[in-house]
Image: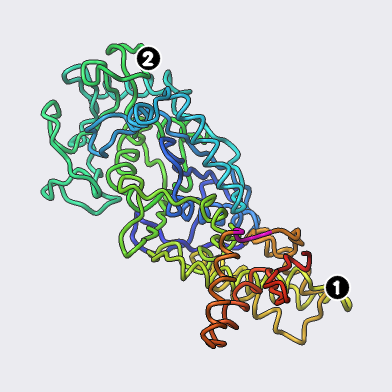
Amino acid sequence: MIIMKIYNTLTNKIEEFIPHTPGEIKMYTCGPTVYHYAHLGNIRTYIMEDVFEKTFNYLGYKVKRVMNITDVGHLESDGDTGEDKMLVAAEREHKTSQEIADYYTEAFFEDCELVNIKKTETIVPATKMITTYIKIIEDLLAKDFAYQAEGNIYFDTAKFTNYYELSGRKAEELMVAVRDSIEEDKSKRNPFDFGLWFTNSKFDNQELKWDSPWGGGYPGWHIECSAIAITYLGEYLDLHFGAEDAVFPHHSNEIAQSEAYLGHKWCNYWVHLSFLNIDNAKMSKSKGDSLRIKNLQEKGYDPLSYRYFVLNTHYHRQVNFSFASLDSAQSAYLKLHKKTSELKDEGQFNEEQFSAYDELFKAALENDLNTANAVTLVHTLLKDDNVNATTKNRLITKWDEVLSLDLKVIKKAELTISLEYIDEMISKRNEAKKNKNFGEADRIRQELLDQNIELEDTREGTTYKVGGLR
């Protein structure tokens, strides 16, 4: 079995990944807070987590993966200030919190399906685990890791020695979060302490409340992931994934409460996916960024072009998104798909060549998930005249178990771009021809052809075919 190398945030270096049980991986991924659509930056994170899971399976591991759905408890600020995001969304859209959760959960999985993200084996809404939160919080209180103040229960970070190990921060920095402007909660012993349970003494208008030994209230965001992971994956977690902005305080808080509760080290490997930027600034819901996969489809893009775009970047590097870069990715993806999907078996399968190329593919993946090299290898294979089509097809089919680009799927003759966009491009081409700018006219024709749209100039005007069909 191949040992994969990954960048571990906990040690701040690339190291060999060795699970607690040989050949088996217990993997937890932070799920969405379902108060709004998942934007492209969110989906980038889930695509890479999907590739990690499929890679581990490809390399021979048995993976058990769990993901939460945050439908309560995630406050406007990571520093435990502001209202519950679900409540804010409910008031904004004049719906109940449950209606908000149901709608945006469905929208999330709809977008995931469009980019071939495998649905997680175990998905747990935060609202289904209330009794478990209470049990853990009672234990933390009994061990003096938590305290009650003004009706709320807080974790005492001063009692947990390794609180800053994951983030590399220092207490004297006096920072509670990395992305929000935080107002200090005067009921805490120190500004770094975080909420485990909030009662109605703090948020009188909270819609979702449950009875607890401390009064009617609801759990803090951080306790949810710990409780769900421990319940469904046990006391020892192999891998924990999330976006890079979750390192502090969310994942630092998870480690503190989990290890205080369990009494031992909880998770050895933490993998964080970097931001997708737009105009060189982090894409986020808090700034109103809500461009989602379905929006790309409505604009005429093949959703898998976005997956292709993501695979050609490294998960641990920030990348800037633009429609120009997506246009390039779509053009490259559709050309690649055309070659792979139309490749017919010819010649006798060569097991030696198959094994040699497959080892190169595995080497790219085990080297800190170098998906860009893995994609490049597909192009290299197609150009290799020494490998026959039968062997190429077997390799491409196998590799697509990880890449999930539908490389051998014959797409139906359907539009991958909108009618409005096609009409707009035809008008621009007509204007270019009128101005005798034939280079631009040819460029537009080729751009549409790359997207499976073939233009035909007739006496009545310009028409088009989709996939060879009018």
Asked if residue 164 lies left or right of residue 247, the reply is left
Q: Nearer the viewer, residue 36 or 163?
A: 36
Q: Position of residue 30 (x, y in %)?
A: 44, 42
Q: Residues within 10 Å of mark 1 (few under 14, many from 20)?
A: some
Q: Is residue 160 visible?
A: yes
Q: From the viewer's side, name the closer residue of 372 and 446.
A: 446
Q: Quadrant of residue 168?
A: bottom left
Quadrant of res 126: top left
Return the residue nearer the eye: 441 or 145.
441
Q: Which residue is mark 2?
A: 210
| Badge count | 2
Q: What amino acid is found at the position of numbered circle 2 in the picture?
A: Trp
Label at residue 278: none
State the mark number for residue 345: 1
Residue 358 visible in the displayed image: no
Q: Secondary structure at mark 1?
A: loop
Q: Amino acid at mark 1?
A: Asp
Above or below residue 124? Residue 54 is: below
Q: Report the Cα–Cα distance between label 2 and label 1.
A: 61 Å
Label 2's element? loop
Number of residues whose C-alpha sits closer than 10 Å to that of mark 2, classed few (under 14), some (14–19) or many (20 or more): some
Residue in view at x 60 percent, y 65 percent: 422
In this picture, residue 457 sits left or right of residue 374: right
Whole-percent x and y of residue 250?
A: 32, 41
Residue at position x 58%, y 77% from top? 430
Give, as a single range, the part of the protein colored magenta: 415-419
Dominant secondary structure of the residues highlighted in magenta in the image: loop
The residue drawn where x is 39% and y is 66% is: 320
Tell me if residue 84 is in the magenta stretch. no
**Residue 263: x and y, percent?**
35, 33
324 with respect to 362 (left or right): left
Q: Is residue 431 above or below residue 418?
A: below
